[in-house]
Image (cartoon, coloured by chain):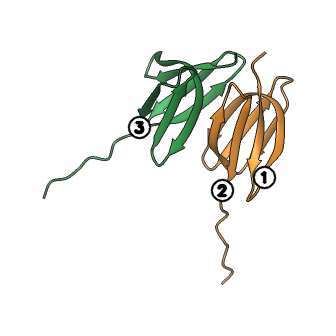
Chain colours: A green, B orange
Amino acid sequence: MCEAHAYLRLDDEDELFFENVDRVEPQDDCLVLENIFGQRKIIKARIKELALVDHKIILEKVEQEKKINN
Amino acid sequence: MCEAHAYLRLDDEDELFFENVDRVEPQDDCLVLENIFGQRKIIKARIKELALVDHKIILEKVEQEKKINN
């Protein structure tokens, strides 16, 4: 099986976000990740890098726009 | 080895673009793909979908802005 693990890139480390990921589908400013068991996670992030031989998907959070209340 | 093959999604089919891809790095509106032999290809596209168990990276061309000559 050639699934990969998804990590969230923080300032000084990569934090494990989701293991055994099979599918990734970018949607607007989100990513829908599905693991080999059919479980899903959605994250407001983009793909920073794939390193498939290392089984790594590196994600980067999308900066949230600040909402201004008038 | 868990590399994948990159396909370009066209209207009615997926066209093989690059085999044995190890690394993918999005840069602005381009993707830099590197295969397991260290060869690189750059394409003006985005990731449409990953299906890692199927060894597939589906790409979608980024629409080029039309240049208007004044």
Task: Say yes or no: labels 3 and 1 on the same chain.
Answer: no
Disc marking residue B62: 2
Q: Could you say where residue A17 lies in the image, as x and y percent from the top left?
A: 45, 20
Disc marking residue B13: 1
Decide which of B28, A50 is in the foreground and name it. Answer: A50
Pointer 3 indicates a residue of which chain? A
Question: Spatial distance from mark 1 to mark 2, Cα to Cα?
Answer: 17 Å
Q: Could you say where residue A31 lies in the image, as x and y percent from the top left?
A: 49, 37
Q: Name the secondary structure under disc 2.
A: loop
Q: Name the secondary structure under disc 3.
A: loop
Q: Say which residue appears at 49% left-offset and 46% top-offset.
A: A27
CB under 8 Å between discs 3 and 1: no
Disc marking residue A9: none
Q: Name the secondary structure under disc 1.
A: loop
Q: Say which residue appears at 61% left-offset and 19% top-offset.
A: A4
Residue B69 sits in which quadrant? Answer: bottom right
Question: Spatial distance from mark 3 to mark 2, Cα to Cα?
Answer: 21 Å
Decide which of A12, A49 is in the foreground and name it. Answer: A49
- The type of residue carrying mark 3 is Lys
Q: Residue furthest left?
A: A70
What residue did someone put label 3 on?
A44
Q: Residue furthest front?
A: A38
Q: Say which residue appears at 79% left-offset and 15% top-offset.
A: B1
Q: Could you say where residue B68 lies in the image, as x and y percent from the top left?
A: 66, 78
Task: Say yes or no: labels 3 and 2 on the same chain.
Answer: no
Pointer 2 indicates a residue of which chain? B
- The type of residue carrying mark 1 is Glu
Mark 1 Cα shell of 10 Å, populated few (<14), some (14-19), many (≥20) = few
Decide which of A69, A44 is in the foreground and name it. Answer: A44
